[in-house]
Image: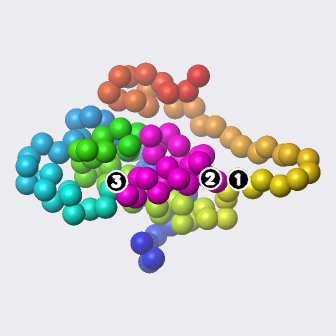
Amino acid sequence: MQNVKLVGSILPTNSKLSASQCLKSKRDKVEMRKIPYAATVESLMYSIVCTRPDIAYVVGTVNCYMSNPGKERCVAVKWMLRYLKGTSSVSLRYNLGKPVLKGCMDSNMLVDVDTNRSTYG
């Protein structure tokens, strides 16, 4: 991941993760065990708690099918690593003094393709 092209969004705009993308053949499942998917997702979860809450939704989505992730979720995790590398100067900082909160939200209806519901209130 050292010489990858950096990205500015958490996921590609055309990316939709769903339950139908899980692996079905035994051969694919055996091949997937060679990829450190679970360890990478756990590291991303730690990042959420410490300094990067902006990736919480996507990490929660890729975490849902930890036992059978599928290739699309692996691509999503790699994309998030590229995003984190490209936005390494962005983080939460805790200090004494007057707190300032800066942020934005992009509303996206029908993000969950499995249930066809929006995830935002």
Above-or-below relation of 40 to 111: below
Q: Can residue 23 be seen in this view?
A: yes
Magenta range: 39-60
Q: Which residue is drawn at 55% across and 27% down?
A: 120
Q: Distance between the residues labelled 3 and 1?
A: 25 Å
The mark nearer the N terminus, 2 or 1, is 2
Which quadrant does the N terminus fall into? bottom left
Judged left or right of residue 115, residue 13 is right
Q: Residue at x 38, y 44 (%)?
A: 62
Say if mark 2 contacts mark 1, CB within 8 Å.
yes
* SS assignment at label 3: helix
Q: Which residue is drawn at 51% across and 59% down?
A: 83
| Main SS of residues in magenta | helix
Which quadrant does the C terminus fall into? top right
- Near mark 1 (Cα within 10 A), the count class, few <14, some 14-19 or many ≥20, is few
The residue nearer to you, when weighing 17 against 51, is: 51
Mark 3 lies on residue: 38
Q: Is residue 10 visible?
A: no
* SS assignment at label 1: loop
Q: Nearer the viewer, mark 2 or mark 1?
A: 2
Which disc is residue 92 wearing?
1
The kind of residue on which mark 1 rests is: Leu
**Most distant residue in the bottom direction:** 3
Position in image of residue 27 (x %, y %): 8, 54
Position in image of residue 28 (x %, y %): 13, 53
The kind of residue on which mark 2 rests is: Cys
The kind of residue on which mark 3 rests is: Ala
